[in-house]
Amino acid sequence: MTMLDEDAFLALNALYLKKMATTGDLAEISGLPCNQVQAMVGSFVERGWLLDMGGDLVIQTDGMAQVQDYYRETYSSLSQREDMRKWYARFQQINTQFIKHVTDWQQTEGDSKVQDRVITTVERLVKLIGEIEQLVPRYTGYIRRFERSSSAVDQGNRDFVCTPTVDSLHNIWFEFHEDFLAVLDRPRDT
Amino acid sequence: MNMVTEAATPTRSSTKWVYPFDEADGLDTASLGGKGTGLVRMTSAGLPVPPGFIIPTGACARCAEDDLPDDLWADVQQAVQALARRANRTFGGGPRPLLVSVRSGAPVSMPGMMDTILNLGLNEAALLALAESTGDTAFVADTFLRFARMFSEIVLGADDDVLDAIEEMKTDLPSASAEKVLPPLAAAVSRTLTDAVGQPFPLDPWEQLRLAIRAVFRSWNSRRAVRYRDYYRIPHDLGTATVVQQMVFGNLGTPAGTGVAFTRDPRTGQATLYGEFLERGQGEDVVAGTHTPEPLTAIAARYPSIVAELGRVAGQLEDLYRDMLDIEYTVEDGTLYLLQVRVGKRSAEAAVRIAVDLVDEERIEPATAITRVTPDQVRQIRRPRFQPEALEAARRDERLLATGVGASPGQVSGVTVVDPARAEQQAAAGQPVILVRTTTSPQDLPGMLASVGIVTARGGSTSHAAVVARALDKPCIVGCGALTIDASHGVVRISGESYPEGSELSIDGASGQIFAGSLATTRGIDEIGDSVARLLDWADATGCEVFTRVSTVDMAAAAIKDGAHGIGVRLDEVLAAAGRLDVLAEVLGAIAAGHQGTDVHVVEAAVTAALTDILAALDYQPFVVRTADLSWERVSETLAELTPGDQPPPGTWLPLGMPALVRAQARGVRNAVRTSGHPGPITLMVGGIVDVAELSALKEICRQEVGEKIHVAAALRSLRGLAALPALAREADAIWLDHRALTASIYHYPDELLVSDGALDAYLEQELLTADPRKEVDDLLRRNVPTVDTVEWGQCCLGVNLVGWGFAESVVEFYRAAGYRRFAVDGDGVQAARLLIGQRAAEADAP
Amino acid sequence: MTMASEIDGYTYIGQGYSVVPVGKHEGIAMNITTPQEMIKLMSDPQKIKETVVVTPGGTTTFVAPILYRKPAGIVTYAGTPESHLGIVGRNFRVPIVMTLQLEGVDSIPDGTPLLLECEGKLGHVYLK
């Protein structure tokens, strides 16, 4: 069995992180053209890597294995590095804060000061990702998404804080976290 | 958003960098920023404001990029020394240390800007001196830790865990003498921060101040602030000002605390102080949510003198600003200080009440009062709509069930009924009913009349349901494909879910959205109807007239109540609302089928019957009757439902293409006038006229069928018609410009389709059109609408018809500026239009 | 603090943190411990709607995506409402009881009919 090529990985990984998404979501997140993703999705379905439930795609166990193999092959040199482990420890600190701020935001019905803290924490993560961007170049995609969604929040579109059905800050954060754990080869839930 | 277009003048070499609050009179907001302007104004009015100074926006550009210029820093040092002398205190030392706050203040507020640093100026000497002078070591420790936390976060960019570590030091304080507690505390903070940030925490107050000021200016160029300005096209060279102010302490002495207050109740506009107070708190506490402030009503019992003093100050502020204000204040050891003032945000109801009350109190003129309320607020009062929070919650909870075509605006909740007869019964029993049908027909009319809203699964924006709902001015959604109706079981199915009859639904007739459950609505007009009426009378004083179109007696009564200056009807709508559209359909069908000499008398009789009641309800108002528009595009869908399969007779699309029908309608009008005893004048209008010959023919018809008592008018719907306007004006008694039809004709869009704007919205979102034809007057139209002073219009009245399209401010302004003073708008827009037109006229009259 | 109340026809079996106050909801328990099991359930939208997902918890982030499919409820044996699961759960208003402390039973077998009561800060679980 051969490993996924990069584009296929980007598309399938987007689904791996979200577990369920539409073709449009995958194109948006991977940054690949829609028709290319469409074609790939078709072939993934044929191979049983994902299931198409009337537009909602759900990843399947074989698809997850494909993505995990790619992570292992591509990032084996990174997963053992001391600096990456240290980076993750720093991430965990702001991760705790981020979750607390978003929870506060939900419970204060979107208090604007709390909202400021949510965005400040996102800005910290963006800076932190900048430090490892050279090691994992595709992480610029997360920076791009974070910036777009925090602009939306600043412009008054509060859905982009944590509504699960849009590309909200919380969604992006969650996906990034899962992604980085996979790079470290530490899928935490198995 | 209010945008300041002119940037503050950049500074020169002889620049004064620093303006104390009492020396900055005459500088504008562009230079002082919003916060600074308020402080300066209150200071010069002698209100209790802690002294301070402003570094104006002009300094921002330089300070944001470089360090603070030497001469600026020297000025700041001097100003701080002056503050210290005046307060008989010392900056960075004893016996009475001076502490300051540093805040940003831009002319326009935006996210990403540095907020507030309190309690700046503490070194070891100042800490001990403050403990000595207050006798309260715990207070000093608390004050220092608050500063350390804010400074670390905002200036040094420390992470939350460092801030948490600082926060924890608060709880670990030993109870010992100031000498044993405070210096070790300062050292511990400094150590923690140096470790975490790699930058020493400055214990020199001057260094603290320099870094804080620099951080304010730099925050102007934070990525968030820049992005925000880009998006809202706020000039980047506007700059922020920095405000440095002597600290007062809400956690020192008794009583002490901090709070916000509105000079009047922002929910109702009642002239009572409204706000809250957090005893023994500083500004940040309220935000952090760790403490809960109490309402002022509770505080009044405990500290009556504080609330009384706040009330006095509120009155003085209102004298100064002549408006309702939002105040931030602090009480230190029993003394009240004001920290910020701005014009207060308020509900629609409060806006009206406050504007009228301020006139009665002789604080403002009526011409000013009408600018204090927005047309949208008046609209909101007239027609309750969903509370924004309720709507947001419904979306968040995924209660949006389906989206159809918005056919007639309005937001309403009710219970589903699928049968028109049951709708009548339920409504009679006091239930708000939403009638849900596959399609509607004239037999459904009584049920539609009884319902508060109408939803159909099929049909477009010109279907029977849509036409009738608009004629009845009821919220309506059509063509909602996700919806099926099982009439035998009384069940509505939406996207697979079943809703038995009696289920609560909420519909938005503008967006076409259907929600599960009922949604809370804003308060209606009843409470403040008189105030609205007075406000609008002042708006009318500018000499404009607002007409509206009705199709039932109830609508006519509502229009008169709303102060419409004239009433119009369209006969096809009147017939639809009376359930007699079938008469038109039959006659047209018969003509189409080639029956020579079809009896059009039934049309005359139907018109007579439908108009008589409406005319009887009016008294002196000018009344315009527009003949039924038979152009197939308009009536095809409606009539197709009535007489499936028929082709239109030739000539229906021409204004006078079926003269027999025009005559029948004219006779119907004549009969109704006679029966009702309306004193006139009545105007008969035909739409789509382009030539003087058409108008002459119409006049001849009227002369023969009605006699001399009737006026004749043309509604113009094309550029050809506009070109003929000067000639038509010599013949007609009135000419109305159908703005929507004119726009549609330029774009070659179907006129009626523009009503349901969903498709056009999506189109605009994809940026396939650069301008929204509904919101801006097309350039081609601008060039072809003659200004009133260029037309010899003699006895002819000119008007602009905006019915069926809401009204955009820019559209009204265009016609007003061109000299048009008479507008026709939808029923629910009469009041809003009266206000808007009055506002525009008042603005134009202002020197 | 809300106390567990007696509900006729139901047996109280424990309490934990409630994420969002959405009242009482019923469903059939299904234990899910691996992403694979979760994916399998996600591929059956009809079944999800009647399922209360029971999961060991801790860092059960793989469970969160199932919320998009609106399960009848979620029960975890670890974790707090301040978590990814909590944030998403609050948005979808799905009844979630976290860090459930069982009383009188030591597990919830697959197929058990459950009632979740999420009214205050605490959530109560009942057996039908």
Image (cartoon, coloured by chain):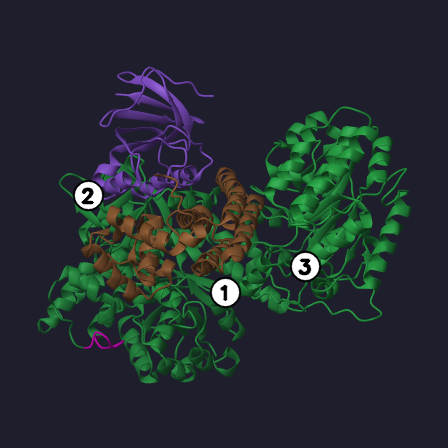
Chain colours: A brown, B green, C purple
> Which residue is the site of mark 2?
B419
Mark 3 vs mark 2, CA separation in Å: 66 Å
Query: Quadrant of residue B13 in the image?
Result: bottom right
Residue B187 visible in this rendered orientation of the protein: yes
> Which residue is the site of mark 1?
B809
The percent position of residue B84, horizontal first and vertical second, equals: 88, 46
In the foreground, A26 or B790: A26
Q: Is residue B279 left or right of residue C62?
A: right
Mark 1 vs mark 2, CA separation in Å: 41 Å
Mark 3 vs mark 1, CA separation in Å: 38 Å
Q: Which of the two discs, 3 and 1, labels the residue nearer the N terminus?
A: 3
> Of discs 3 and 1, which sits in the foreground?
3
In the foreground, C26 or B394: C26
Residue B599 visible in this rendered orientation of the protein: no
Q: Is B654 one of the magenta-colored residues?
A: yes
Task: From this view, report whether residue B452 is shown above or below residue B466.
Answer: above
The amino acid beneath tag 3 is Arg
